[in-house]
Amino acid sequence: MASWRLILMAVCIALTPVGVRLGSAAGLDRLGEEFRTGLYEQCLESAQKEASDGTYGPDRSAWIVKSLMALGRYSEAAQEMDAALQNDPMSIRLTLLAHTAYQYNGQPERAALMLARVYRIATARRLGFISSLDLVALGDALLRLGGEPRIILGEFFDQAMQRDPNCREAYLAVGDLAMAKQDYDLAATQYRKALERFGDDPDAHAGLAKAFYPSDRQAMIKALDAALHVNPRHTQSLILLAEHQIDSEDYDGAAKTLDRTIAVNPWHPETWALRCVLAHMANDPNAVKECRAKALQSWQTNPQVDFVIGRKLSQKYRFAEGAMYQQQALRYDTGYLPAKGQLVEDLLRLGEEQEGWKLAQELYAKDPYNVNAYNLLRLHDNLSKFKTLSVEGFTIRIDSLEAEVYGDRVARVLGQARSQLCRKYGLSPEGTVTVELFTNQQDFAVRTFGMPGGDGFLGVCFGRVITANSPRLQRPANWEAMLWHEYCHVVTLTLTGNKMPRWLSEGISVYEELQRNPSWGQRMIPPYRKMVLGGELVPIGELSGAFLNPPTAMHLQFAYYESSLVVEFLVDRFGLASLKAVLADLAKGDQINAAISRNAVPLETLEPQFEAFARRRAEGLAPDVDWEEPEKEKVDRTDAQAVAQWLAGHPSSFWALQARANQLLAERRWEDAKGPLGKQISLYPQYTGEGNAYQLLAQVHHQLGETQQEGQVLDKLATLSADAADAYGRMMEIGIEQKDWRQVLRNGDRYLAVYPLLSAVHWRMGLASEGLGQEEQAVESYRRVLLLDPSDPVEVNYRMACLLQQRDPAAAKRYVLNALADAPRFRNAHRLLLRLGATAGNGSAVVAPVETGHRPAVQEDVQ
């Protein structure tokens, strides 16, 4: 067969500016409307009646075939195709439709012949015209033959829209092509254009829903509702809805939705593929085999079936099973790119990187417009620049500079998590866990989600692979707590073979954060209190869905908190052994409800008990606080007098105390602000949220020069909060001033768990270590300072030289020479160099004290 590019040349020569659309008669419009609204039987009957009356045409034959296909009557559709092609053997659209019909009848050779026929029709057509609809069909055929997507987009689909702006199929074709290349923004734009021009089109609504599926489930549900409003039997929409329900672990709901598709088409491959997924979730191997067989009944080598099954299993973190299905799909069709792309992600998440990256390169070579493949190869290039740290049980990939500055802390935290959590849950760790810390957030997103985005995520665990954002990218957040959280996922996912609901996995990890450090994890806070008492507690059986479609960021955080509260309740009420038994049952394939019932109480009993537990926790939050807030219309919140009057009538109002304190601070009435701030702390001492009273009261003491009281307040905040970087930094300053070296080290350690890449923190820790006579620790701190390129390295180099002059004179000489290179007149450095020279001559050393006499080395502010 000649190159497909010859078709492009021939068609471009043959195209004429005629914009006539075939099949625009009233009867055809009626058939299209019946099909659009899901009246497939009526559409079939109408088209057959018109055909029997002698009103023949390729469009009527197409509606007959499409209706039969929609109803799952594949053999009849093939027979109709045979007849239609005899009557109109040169129809591009009918021939392409025959390709699909024959595929669904397990006739791959005949299906391939249809694509070859489309090719011959296009190259042989010299005169006349090609309609916009045929142009779209031809472009579709060329894509299936492996044509260049960009050329087909411009010369076929875009050309069809230019010639006929009302060619609906062209808009949908562009959207579908963008979806196939994972360009979801372009796809959404195109489907919106179709909706703007053609109104409520269920195919366009469903396409828009698919474009939103990876990123915005609320928008997806809205689009699906619109599609199903027009066509309640729209199989494409129902299948996507079932996928969402599976993601939400609403397996009963998914089964009912799939029943609706079976009522329309009892043999739809995707329907039975999703039924197979449900059987996997129910640990029913017989049903797995039966559902897969039904999915493949009419087309036994359909690669889409195993692709769908594997993709959904991978979305459940069952990557090994998912990869097996993708490999089966590729055995059916070695060129099936969706399966190859999913297999790349599965292999990388399983830690099988050599094979995964090799396959990614093959995918990109085959499909250079595949966005995921391009992003992955770019990521691979960036990863190759990382430094690899190998410690017991871990392979840590990290930016080279960051590895030198805090890589040892990463290894230490992970090692402690491995030791403590594995022992606690009875796991004997085997193999190596890969941990990757990304300095580029988009690299993290591509590695984690397969696409850019993912804002708000700090880290993700796939079982044997942990990906995380570097601390330099985070908002104030404790990265050590994050690593502990993610390694806990390693433990629980390993124990269950990745067969656990998301809420339980997240709940245990947040719970274990709190067990490790009371300032880590999550606690009851005012927004959570309001949600619990306001009836927004999510039933335990629906908790996993709360992570998928939260209306606000606060609702997502609440899902994590509520999940941890459920775990706390289970452990407190039934013991850790009960929780471990639940995990063991999940590993056997039991459903979560059955596992909880066996090892605790049935879910219908547990849920009201937990709700009462959660309400008690919410009601117990600062019980003496008056949580009432005035309506905005009744109290002007910017009026100091109005706020003061409200506070007089509500002396324990947390809102009023906060508002009054902020007003007094704005007026610089420092002494007066102490009252409402101190009362906030006495009423609610655990509050460390934004604008907390500890932080503000410390500012008051600072303004009044009350350093001792400032330090006492900040010390309480530092004890309660895992990410109060400002408090840690100020405590270090106070410690330096007071030469309280242990305080400096304690708060420096806290600070580095939030921001490890500030040279000023390491500088102060070096001073503190020197003050305590801990020379080795001081050298390490100063080494890190120099790595972070301080604005003035002279004194750091000099101090390093002084500390090393006895045990490593050669290194000391290098450091003092570095100091003199930047400050040639630094006399103390000259004296030290002379002493080092004398040492080299007689082999003995006289240790010189550290004499500064140079301007302060580190000018960097500590946040």
Image (tube, helix red, strand yellow):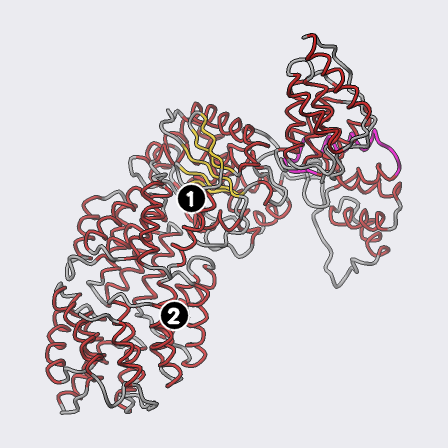
**Above-or-below relation of 425 to 148:** above
Lateral position of residue 1 relative to residue 227, left or right = left
Query: Between tags 1 and 2, which lies in front?
Result: 2
> What segment is highlighted magenta in the picture?
704-725
Numbered tag placed on residue 633 in the rendering:
none
Depth check: give the residue in front, 404 or 535.
Answer: 404
Q: Secondary structure at mark 2?
A: helix
Q: Are marks 1 and 2 in contact (CB under 8 Å)?
A: no
Q: Which residue is farthest front?
A: 841
Which residue is at 37% across, 59% downward?
370
Q: Is residue 447 magenta?
A: no
Residue type pointed to by label 1: Arg
Query: x, y (%) of residue 402?
Result: 57, 36
Residue at point 23% right, 44% down? 284
Question: Could you classify mark 1 by the number of other residues whose Cα lies within 10 Å: few (under 14), some (14-19), or many (20 or more)?
Answer: many
Q: Amino acid at mark 2?
A: Gly
The percent position of residue 184, horizontal first and vertical second, equals 43, 63
User: Which secondary structure class fits the magenta region best?
Assistant: helix
Q: Where is residue 530 drawn, in percent x and y?
A: 61, 49
Q: What residue sits right under mark 1 in the picture?
A: 502
Left or right? Give the position of 292 relative to 518: left
Q: Which residue position is annotated with label 2?
A: 175
